[in-house]
Amino acid sequence: MSREWEETFSSWAQAPGKTENERIERTVNSIRNALNADDFLSSRSKVYAQGSYRNRVNVRQDSDVDIGILYTGNTFYPDYPEGMSKSDVGNIDGDYTYPEFKDRVETALVEYYGRGAVKRGKKAFDLHENTYRVDADVVPVFEHRRYSQDGSYICGVQLFPDDGGKIINWPERLYDDKHWPNQHYENAVSKNTNTGRRYKGTVRVLKKLRNTMDEKGISAAKPVSGFLIECLVWNTPNNKFVGDYWEDDVRSCITHLWSNTKKFEDCNEWGEVSEFKYLFRGSPDTKRQQAHAFIDSAWDFIGVKS
């Protein structure tokens, strides 16, 4: 069969090269230096890489990096089972707030890089790239604890966007203890191994495909995040990664996703890569609809045969 996209997909599947990765590492180290210049933040924060760079699904020429800044003082945000409260596990209220922390991080970044290089967003600070570093999204977070009835808990991170609400995520293990699972990173590594190292390559291909479609003005590509693409490929069965040609894997993945995102009931059990959160549950059903519209447009763009 004709494989007109194979050469392109083979290139897109590759991880960024040494030069780009070195710029990313310099960015991470630079942000650590910015925070360490503030005595309070130096002793009460932890800087860590997250997202596509940490999980090795970032793509060439699109190698911005997500950086988390975890507050390590005595305040955290708990989630108790029904009928439980802080008194049941001996917790007390913390003395430091998320807005105070985010404002302090902003001050430290601006003092180190200058106001022109730092833009405050609702969730993150956009640190603009230069010849030395890549573009970075710097996200201040607090520890989140999900408690069980027996008083045990697992840790994630929590943030509060400036326009309201809260967001809970489950990044890599930030401390080497039983409370911090490493689910996202370990799950991705396991799936990559079980698919003959085709999972992460397919994620990169679909992310580059999304970028290309967006550049060509295909509206369905714009609202779809790289994280959503990673989760969509995560929910594609391992037997869809046939392993001979990238084009075969991508077409097989798109066909599966197109069939299973048409209706909510066909994908309502799908989870994020961490498997700590459902991917599409919640109201309204916007994310699933956006995912299906993107896959439908990608189907047409590369000419998947039904």
Image (cartoon, grey):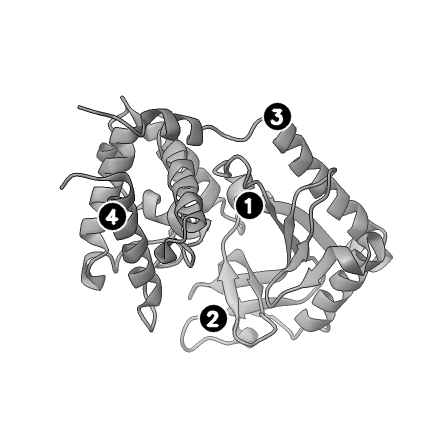
Does residue 52 appear left or right of residue 262 in this picture?
Answer: right
Please report whichever mark, 1 or 2, sits nearer to the chain's N-terminal start: 2
Query: Who is closer to the viewer here, 305 or 158?
Result: 305
Q: Is residue 283 above or below residue 199?
A: below
Spot the residue most to the top. Answer: 244
Report if the CB atoms under discs 3 and 1 are less than 8 Å apart.
no
For marks 2 and 3, give the one nearer the viewer: 3
Amino acid marked by disc 3: Lys
Q: CA distance from mark 3 to mark 1?
A: 25 Å
Amino acid marked by disc 2: Tyr
Q: Position of residue 102 (x, y in %)?
A: 70, 66
Residue under label 4, please give it: 257
Q: CA distance from mark 1 to mark 2?
A: 21 Å
For marks 1 and 2, give the one nearer the viewer: 1
Say what secondary structure mark 2 lies in: loop
Q: Is residue 279 above or below residue 80?
A: above
For marks 3 and 1, give the one nearer the viewer: 3
Residue 217 seen by the camera: yes
Residue under label 1, please give it: 173
Residue under label 3, please give it: 18
Report if the CB atoms under discs 1 and 2 are less than 8 Å apart.
no
Residue under label 2, please give it: 80
Please report whichever mark, 4 or 2, sits nearer to the chain's N-terminal start: 2
Does residue 6 appear left or right of residue 44 in this picture?
Answer: left
Q: CA distance from mark 1 to mark 4?
A: 30 Å
Q: Position of residue 57 (x, y in %)?
A: 47, 38
Please report whichever mark, 2 or 3, sits nearer to the chain's N-terminal start: 3
Residue shown at the point (38%, 29%) measured from the top left: 8
Query: Who is closer to the viewer here, 235 or 249?
Result: 249
